[in-house]
Image (cartoon, rainbow, N blue to C red):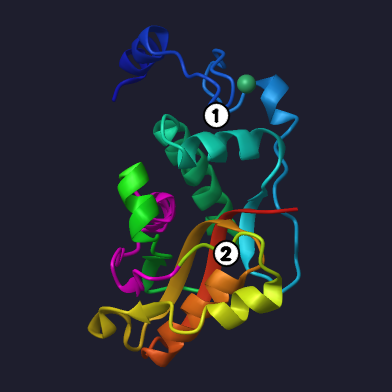
């Protein structure tokens, strides 16, 4: 698109802050909301990588994203997250992007899996193939609210399984979730992917709870 056309477009469709909706002139967050965006600087290699800390403006956007109405905002945040990931991943080429599957109930309620949308944007940004249904989640599994980290990990046995082994076999998989809390979900999915033949797994979440 030509520059003049692009300017015209931004005149008619001004970029709005994905958090509060005020006009920003091209940035995802307005200067007010940007103050409440914390990039995740956790460098602990045993923890899954995240782009942002789940608080402030990022938390607001993700809550809207996960409870519908904030679909576009969620996509924009995912694109920003993918860009951050791109910078840290450079020396480690990956083969495939796989999202953490969501449960049937939440899928029916929302009509979409937020992790799959984040994975889609990550795959696009990194020019990697996406295997959106490589993993699947058992239909009988209930949520994890109110459980300790140990209870979560114990109750995760057999929750996820590789539905498409041919897609993951021998591949370096980038496993993507929307928000990581204890890391139990990512750990369970990573385990299944390795069991299912993946050569290695790197985890990435859009945000990590503080
Ligand atoms: Zn704002």
Residue 210 as seen in the image, left or right of residue 6: right
Task: Say which element carries label 2.
Answer: loop
Q: Residue at x 60, y 82 (%)?
A: 154
Q: Position of residue 93 (x, y in %)?
A: 46, 73
Q: Residue at x 30, y 21 (%)?
A: 2
Q: Quadrant of ligand 1?
A: top right
Q: Is residue 32 left or right of residue 158?
A: right
Q: Indicate the position of residue 20 as horizontal and vertical percent values.
A: 59, 20
Q: Earlier in the sequence, mark 2 or mark 1?
A: 1
Residue 112 can be seen, yes or no:
yes
Position of residue 61 measured from the top left corner of the image (x, y, whole percent) = 56, 34
Identify the magenta region: 112-141
Residue under circle 2?
A: 144
Q: Is residue 111 above or below residue 33?
A: below
Q: Where is residue 147 drawn, in percent x and y?
A: 66, 67
Whole-angstrom CA distance, mark 2 to mark 1, is 32 Å
Residue under the point 40% across and 60% down: 102
- Quarter of the view holding residue 25: top right
Q: Where 61 sits versus 194, above or below?
A: above
The disc placed on residue 119 is: none
Residue visible at 66% across and 33% down? 57
Q: Which mark is residue 28?
A: 1
């Amino acid at each position: 698109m030509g520059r003049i056309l692009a300017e015209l477009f931004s005149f008619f469709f001004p970029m709005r802050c994905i958090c509060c909706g005020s006009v920003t002139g091209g940035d995802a967050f307005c200067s007010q909301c940007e103050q409440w965006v914390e990039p995740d600087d956790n460098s602990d290699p045993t923890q899954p990588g995240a782009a942002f800390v789940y608080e402030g403006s990022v938390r607001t956007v993700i809550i809207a994203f996960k409870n519908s109405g904030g679909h576009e905002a969620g996509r924009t945040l995912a694109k920003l997250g993918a860009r951050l990931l791109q910078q840290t991943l450079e020396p480690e080429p990956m083969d495939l992007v796989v999202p953490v599957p969501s449960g049937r109930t939440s899928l029916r309620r929302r009509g979409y899996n937020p992790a799959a949308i984040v994975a889609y944007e990550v795959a696009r940004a990194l020019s990697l193939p996406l295997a959106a249904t490589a993993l699947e989640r058992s239909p009988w599994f209930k949520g994890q609210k109110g459980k300790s980290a140990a209870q979560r990990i114990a109750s995760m046995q057999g929750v996820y399984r590789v539905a498409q082994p041919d897609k993951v076999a021998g591949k370096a998989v980038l496993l993507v979730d929307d928000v990581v809390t204890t890391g139990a979900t990512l750990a369970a999915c990573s385990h299944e992917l390795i069991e299912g033949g993946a050569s290695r797994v790197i985890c990435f979440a859009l945000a990590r709870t503080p």
